Image: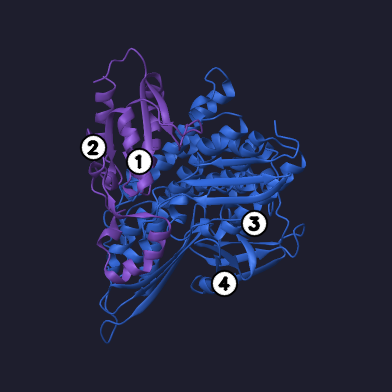
Chain colours: A purple, B blue
Amino acid sequence: MISMDKKLRIGWFSFTCCEDSTIIFTELLNKYCKEWLQKIEFVHARVLMKKNSKEIKEMDVAFIEGAISSNSQEAKLKKIREKAKILVAIGSCAINGSPSNQRNFFNQENIEEIRPILEIFKYKEKVLKVSEVVRVDESVPGCPMNETIFLELMKKCLL
Amino acid sequence: MHDPGNNFDINLEEISKIEGAASLELKVRNNKIEDLKFSISEWKRFYTQAIKGKPVVAIPQLVARICGTCSNAHLLAAIEAVEKAFNIVPSAQTMLLRKLLYYGLIIRDHALHLYVFSLPDLFGKDSILDFDENDPIQHELLDDTFSVKEVGNQLSIVVGGRSVHAPQPTIGGFLKLPELVQIKNLKNDLLNIRPKIIKLIQIYLEAKDYQVLKAPMSFAGLYSSDFSFLEGTVKSCTSADPSDSLAICKMIAEEDLGKYLEGIVIPYSHARGFKFDGNLMMVGALARLNISKENLNSKTKESAKEALKLFPSTNLYHNNLAQAVEILHAIDASFEIIDGLNEITPESPIKINPPAGGPKKTIGIGVIEAPRGSLYYRLEINADGTVKKGEIIVPTGQNQIVMEKAIYELVENLLLTNANQEKIIVEVEKLIRAFDPCMSCAAHFLKVKWK
């Protein structure tokens, strides 16, 4: 998929979600860390390291977990899209928006209850799935993400 | 370097190596803190509203999605609340299997925190992945990181079907029971990681970080004879003054915990911190060892003798040491359960039966010890089996006030020693990590801007 003269530069980003796929990913490192570290450079991964600069860097693959709740999240996702050759939506919230988008389906009473928070902190009117904001190249479905599909995709990226 | 008056601003947008997103803003003028805000930068998903009106049987799997890290804690706390509401008493086998599933979570979650989040601080590294392969100690710790986490992960997978959002545990039992042979196979793996954890305990025993809050505190958690995290009575122990031992202890029934937890709305924010019976409170591994170290597995007590002498402790960094001890307990207690298991009896989950006289409204309360502390669920259920109202109190909320106070006092102390900005950032992050906050959980219930 990508020339392997140098290491594959990957980024892992979490938006609005429970970060279950981040956990699955860190558990996959138990088995694959040694192999992957020879071929991969982590450019962004808040769970693993501090040196995530605020400025989004060029990446071969960006993994996106979670749904989009705010304009700031939307802007960041667009920036990631500009910098990533391949963008992968990871897990149910990124792919379908659910369950992080459950407020989209609230009745009037529930909406009124949360309205002050939505307004003060400038939430978007509706929670968006990733493909409503940017072009998505690949997807790994599941809640949390399906490990087998993720591993197949990694294999493809590392070819 | 600072200008002579020592004025500077620190703005950490996303603190790394914690669960979820949090940020810190600090304004120092004339060497004094003018403004300090530790805020949760997670966007809310409104679970307490979302569960209203849904069938109560669907709630445990939905609330598991509050948090990817401790999903099985939310799952089991919600299951307990529903079972209590309908007077379902799970079988002895169900409880044993739930404990095994849970010990898997404790091993995996504490190991993630200690090895991946905290250990790099002790070694002056940015990431566990930067540990030096050519340094025998660092190389070994990198290997330990993955082998320890993997055993916890496998334990939860074998018993619960998956380590995150486990599909098999349900109200009244298990949808699909695990295979005995697969459980037995884990015994060797548990034994193999035991010496690694003894080494980890030693590392945190030797760590010199120290901070005691300048105020009396209450430590609270579930107290049970087998330190199982899932059962027991709530126990709280309080110091009369900061230097005092935790002499004043009391026991509280699970269903009464809500009366003692006092939600504090922080006026300049949307936060809800908590006090315990009017005192500053802390929950989690440190609190559990402070109130019930005598109930740890006997093998753990023997092997962690030196470490356990330090508890009860009010040194906030001892939360790390306490987590390391709890991993050892989870290993030893799992081994004992697996050793004693001779068969898995086929059992279907106990069904919810409508009470005599037809369906009626009910309330269920579930309290368990999540990895980061007491997790409280209170579900009000309509006669038609839907949720009328739910209240969920998470550990990070209960620790919020103490955590902020500790950050403030730490920065004050550092300013007295003329620490530079870089040093302040490093030390504040290290302290926040020692609390092991879980922002995914906390986000749904509070929003903090602290001045």
Q: Contact (CB < 8 A) between labels 2 and 4?
A: no
Secondary-structure class at tag 4: helix
Quarter holding residue B114: top right
Q: Are marks 2 and 4 on the same chain?
A: no
Residue at the top extreme, as displayed: A5
Which numbered disc covers residue A75?
1
Q: Contact (CB < 8 A) between labels 2 and 1?
A: no
Secondary-structure class at tag 2: strand
Which numbered disc covers residue B136?
none
User: Callout 4: 10 Å neighbours few (<14), some, many (20+)?
Assistant: few
- The residue identified by callout 3 is B290
Q: Amino acid at mark 1?
A: Ala
Q: Amino acid at mark 2?
A: Ser
User: In the image, is B315 to the left or to the right of B347?
Assistant: right
User: Callout 3: 10 Å neighbours few (<14), some, many (20+)?
Assistant: many
Place of residue B299 in the rendered image (x, y in percent of width and height, measured from the top left): 58, 46
Q: CA distance from mark 3 to mark 4?
A: 19 Å
- The residue identified by callout 4 is B260
Q: Nearer the viewer, mark 3 or mark 4?
A: 4
- The residue identified by callout 2 is A139
Residue drawn at x 60%, y 41% is: B10
In the rendered view, tell whether residue B189 sits above or below residue B129: below
Q: CA distance from mark 3 to mark 1?
A: 46 Å
User: In the image, is B75 to the left or to the right of A2?
Assistant: right
Q: Nearer the viewer, mark 2 or mark 3?
A: 2
Q: Nearer the viewer, mark 4 or mark 1?
A: 1
Q: Viewer-proximal residue, B429 or B343?
A: B429
Subunit bearing disc 2:
A
